Image (tube, rainbow, N blue to C red):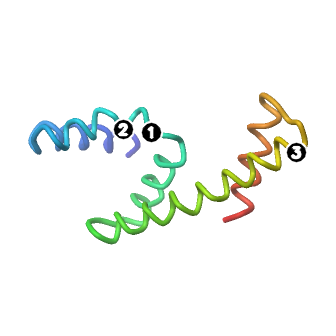
């Protein structure tokens, strides 16, 4: 299933025209939270406006939590793997 989604995205990009193709080409450059939100939407079998709404809310929620958790990590003077682990757990706990 994980391999099928990128294949379908590329197939859609090939037939959808230059606007979607440009968006699909930049997809790997997206942050981890965007792909996590997309994955959650796929697991819930959301499509169309419901998927768009879910992903938008998911990214906003994760973005706010991420910023707050990054600030907490900075206050604790964490760096490297310790910071990444702390932020990941903090964001998960915030959801």
Mark 2 against mark 3, which lies toward the viewer? 3
Q: Is residue 78 left or right of residue 70?
A: right
> Which label belongs to residue 30?
1
In the image, taking residue 1 as reference, residue 16 lies left or right, namely left
Q: Give the image quarter of residue 22.
A: top left
- Local crowd at mark 2 within 10 Å, few (<14), some, or many (≥20)? some
Q: Earlier in the sequence, mark 2 or mark 3?
A: 2
Provide the residue designation for mark 2: 27
- Furthest-bottom residue in view? 50
Which label was assigned to residue 44?
none
* Residue 55 figure quarter: bottom left
Question: In front here: 50 or 77?
Answer: 77
* Disc on the earlier residue, 3 or 1: 1
Q: CA distance from mark 2 to mark 1?
A: 5 Å
> Which residue occupies 70% across, 55% down?
91
Report the Cα–Cα distance between label 2 and label 3. 32 Å
Which residue is at 38% across, 46% downward? Answer: 1
In the picture, residue 65 is in which quadrant?
A: bottom right
Dot 3 corresponds to which residue? 75
Residue 53, position as x, y percentages in the image: 38, 68
Density class for disc 1 (Cα within 10 Å; few <14, some 14-19, many ≥20) is few
Q: Position of residue 63 (x, y in %)?
A: 59, 54
């Amino acid at each position: 299933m994980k391999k099928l989604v990128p294949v379908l995205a590329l197939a859609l990009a090939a037939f959808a025209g230059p606007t979607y193709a440009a968006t699909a080409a930049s997809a790997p450059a997206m942050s981890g939270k965007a792909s996590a939100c997309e994955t959650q939407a796929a697991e819930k079998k959301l499509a169309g406006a419901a998927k768009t709404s879910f992903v938008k809310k998911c990214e906003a929620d994760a973005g706010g939590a991420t910023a707050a958790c990054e600030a907490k990590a900075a206050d604790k003077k964490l760096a490297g793997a310790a910071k990444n682990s702390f932020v990941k757990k903090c964001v998960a706990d915030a959801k």
